Amino acid sequence: MLNLIIRKWIEPYKLLETIKEHSAMEDFSFDGSNKAILKAHFLKLLKSDKEFGLYMKNVNKFYLFDTNCNVKDLLIKTFDLTENDYEITEDEHKPFDDIDSGKAEASIIMF
């Protein structure tokens, strides 16, 4: 499955609200002490019964969404993303690593 890594800065609230207009959402707040545990739980849920996940820079939450909308096309159109503004990858670690290292603003995880 492909993952979408967004490099262009988008107001986190606006990104979240745009997706929520098309999806039911569940979120998991974390801190330094429970991030690894919640990430494992997030990935387990994502692989079992959720359509896609969202992880954003400087927001200590993992988001799960139930939807059948094409989130990639929705975000590209809504935020006028060009090919330089995002990357598509099959690597399941890169969406998290790029956010944590500050190389990206948000990642859509679609295992």
Image (spheres, rainbow, N blue to C red):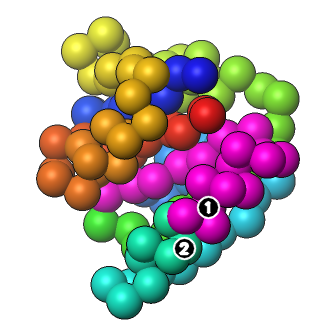
Observer-nearest of 15 and 1: 1
Dots 2, 1 in contact, CB < 8 A:
yes
Which image quarter is the N terminus in? top right
Q: Secondary structure at mark 2?
A: helix
Front residue of this view, candidates 111 and 104: 111
Residue at the disc numbered 1: 42
Q: What residue is drawn where x is 83% and y is 29%? A: 68
Residue found farthest to the top: 83
State the image quarter where residue 36 is shown: bottom left
The single residue placed furthest to the bottom in the displayed view is 33
Quadrant of residue 26 within the rendered picture: bottom right
The residue at 51%/65% (across/down) is: 39
> What's the amino acid at mark 1?
Phe
Q: Nearer the viewer, residue 45 or 80?
A: 45
Side of 109 where 26 appears, left or right: right
Residue 15 showing in the rendered view? yes
- Say whether residue 97 is magenta: no
Question: Position of 97 compared to 103: left or right?
Answer: right
Q: Position of residue 20 (x, y in %)?
A: 71, 50
Q: CA distance from mark 2 to mark 1?
A: 6 Å
Numbered label attached to residue 11:
none
Amino acid type, label 2: Leu
Q: In the rendered view, would you say 19 is above or below 84? A: below
Would residue 4 be visible to someone looking at this image?
no
Picture disc at residue 38: 2
Q: Which residues are drawn in magenta?
A: 40-57
